[in-house]
Image: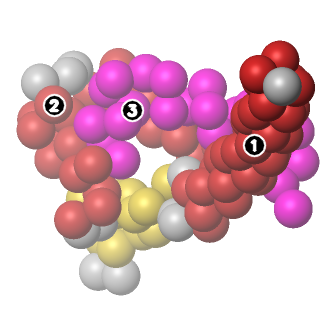
Amino acid sequence: MMSQHDLDQTLVALADPARRGIIELLRKKPRRAGELAEALSLNRPRMSQHLRVLRRSGLVEEDSVEHDARVRVFRLRMEPLAQVRDWLNEVEEFWTAQLSAFKAQAERAGSKRRQ
């Protein structure tokens, strides 16, 4: 189960449109920071800030390239997204049960009035 702190960090990371853009690009394939910056028309310092937030949240991980340790490749980690999906499913189940109970109560009250 995802901790509340982890969930908060993931949702904060996903709240920014540029970071969601990074996630979309990384869904297709791992990329270097420069590629991400160019694709999203962001300067490198801003991209670095976004990647730092995404790494802290666990949504993105960083690897060095075998032949050049200076080059970093970023890839998407699906675990935090799966945990958010699980949390949303729990919320949906709760509200579905609540609304079903409310509907049943309303129908009982309505049938009593008709009698």
What residue is shown at x 23% (from left), y 51% (from top)?
25
Q: Are marks 1 and 3 in contact (CB under 8 Å)?
A: no
Quadrant housing residue 34: top left
Looking at the rendered structure, the kind of residue marked 1 is Ser
Name the residue carrying label 3: 19
Residue sticking out furthest to the front? 115
The dot on residue 40 is 2
Residue type (three-letter) at the residue carrying disc 3: Arg
Which span is picked out in magenta? 1-23
Give coordinates of residue 3: x percent, y percent: 89, 48
Q: Percent from the top left, x then y, of residue 50?
A: 44, 29
Q: Is residue 73 above or below residue 46?
A: below
Q: Amino acid at mark 2?
A: Leu
| Residue 100, label in figure | 1
Label 3, residues with CA under 10 Å away: few <14, some 14-19, many ≥20: many
Q: Secondary structure at mark 3?
A: helix
Find the distance from the CA under tag 1 to the CA under tag 2: 44 Å
**Considering only order in the chain, which callout, 3 or 1, is on the residue closer to the N terminus?**
3
